[in-house]
Amino acid sequence: MKFEEIEALMRRNESLSEQYILPENFIIVRLDGKGFTKLTKEKLSLEKPFDQKFSQIMIDTTKYLFNVGFKVIYGYTQSDEISLLIHKEDNTFNRKIRKINSVLAGEASAFFSLKFQEICVFDCRTIAIPNQEMLLDYFCWRQEDSHRNSLSAHCYWTLRKNGFNAKQTTEKVEKLSQSDKNELLFQYGINYNSLPLWQKRGVGIINKEMKKEGLNPITKEPVAYLRNELLVENELPTRESYRTFLKEIFEKI
Ligand SMILES: Nc1nc2c(ncn2[C@@H]2O[C@H](COP(=O)(O)OP(=O)(O)OP(=O)(O)O)[C@@H](O)[C@H]2O)c(=O)[nH]1
Ligand SMILES: [Mg+2]
């Protein structure tokens, strides 16, 4: 086959396997640390179950992803994952899923690795969301996941720190209901309700248009202007209140 024929065939096959997020759909991406159970244990030496520095770097990575070319409306991070809501009309990379996933995974992995001076890798998946109700369901689902994982992680590490081995602990925690888990923590002197909210509910990042005041450099008169700022919400509300909080953000878009 001639070079031109090979090229045409390759390009045709490449474009026929392309997938897109359809128009009129919101784009949600979720990035997740690859093999972070092992990485956090062996290379990053973090506080267990929750580490303030790790969480701050997850927040910084989320903030960084607001500025890599997509119109991001809301970011949410918990544990080793980041969700981003991208504007319905964002047309970056013609909404090609392969490009969105690879570029965002690359950006997050590079940023996070630099912060820890270790190779840390994120995967990324893209989800099409056709309406606002599903957006709310998505973020409430991730927050519920955060809450469940946090309760289990606190139980796990409380038992480990009190002499149980990994196998015993996993078996014990798996069998417990949500209220049993609260009770277990209580027996070890931990009141789950009084633990920091970011550990239980995750952290939200909002791209907010803020009114600012400055001075006109020529006339020296005060002038008002608008500037976008990223606000970090470490104390997110839950359930219905979280839906209301999100609705207020989404209604402005
Ligand atoms: N010590 C510590 N570990 C954390 C913290 N946040 C997240 N992790 C770890 O990150 C892991 C995230 O779990 P998963 O994403 O389900 O598992 P994974 O090992 O990353 O596996 P894949 O995502 O499937 O590649 C948890 O098991 C925790 O061990 C933290 O603040 N401190
Ligand atoms: Mg992971």
Image: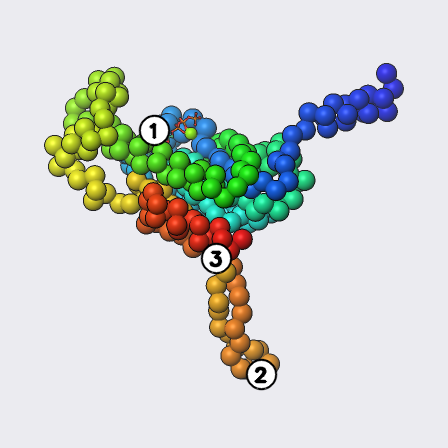
Give the colouring mode of the picture: rainbow
- In primary-sequence order, the first of circles 3 and 1 is 1
Q: Nearer the viewer, mark 2 or mark 1?
A: 2
In the picture of the structure, the residue carrying the numbered disc 1 is 41
Residue 35 vertical position relative to residue 251 in the rendered view, above or below: above
Residue 230 vertical position relative to residue 129 in the rendered view, above or below: below
**Lateral position of residue 15 relative to residue 203, left or right:** right
**Lateral position of residue 170 relative to residue 129, left or right:** left
Disc number at residue 6? none
Neighbourhood count class around disc 2 (C-alpha, 10 Å): few under 14, some 14–19, many 20 upward: few
Circle 2: residue type = Thr
In the picture of the structure, the residue carrying the numbered disc 2 is 219
Q: Could you tell me how far apart the alpha carbons at marks 3 and 1 are, in whole angstroms?
A: 36 Å
**Quadrant hosting ligand 1:** top left
- In primary-sequence order, the first of circles 2 and 3 is 3
**Lateral position of residue 80 relative to residue 125, left or right:** left
Q: Is disc 2 placed on a helix, strand or loop?
A: loop
Could one spot residue 185 in this view of the protein?
Answer: yes
Circle 1: residue type = Lys
- In primary-sequence order, the first of circles 2 and 1 is 1
In the image, what residue occupies the spot 43% across and 38% down?
137
Could one spot residue 110 in this view of the protein?
Answer: no
Q: Nearer the viewer, mark 3 or mark 1?
A: 3
Q: Nearer the viewer, mark 2 or mark 3?
A: 3
Q: Could you tell me how far apart the alpha carbons at marks 2 and 1 are, in whole angstroms?
A: 59 Å
Neighbourhood count class around disc 3 (C-alpha, 10 Å): few under 14, some 14–19, many 20 upward: some
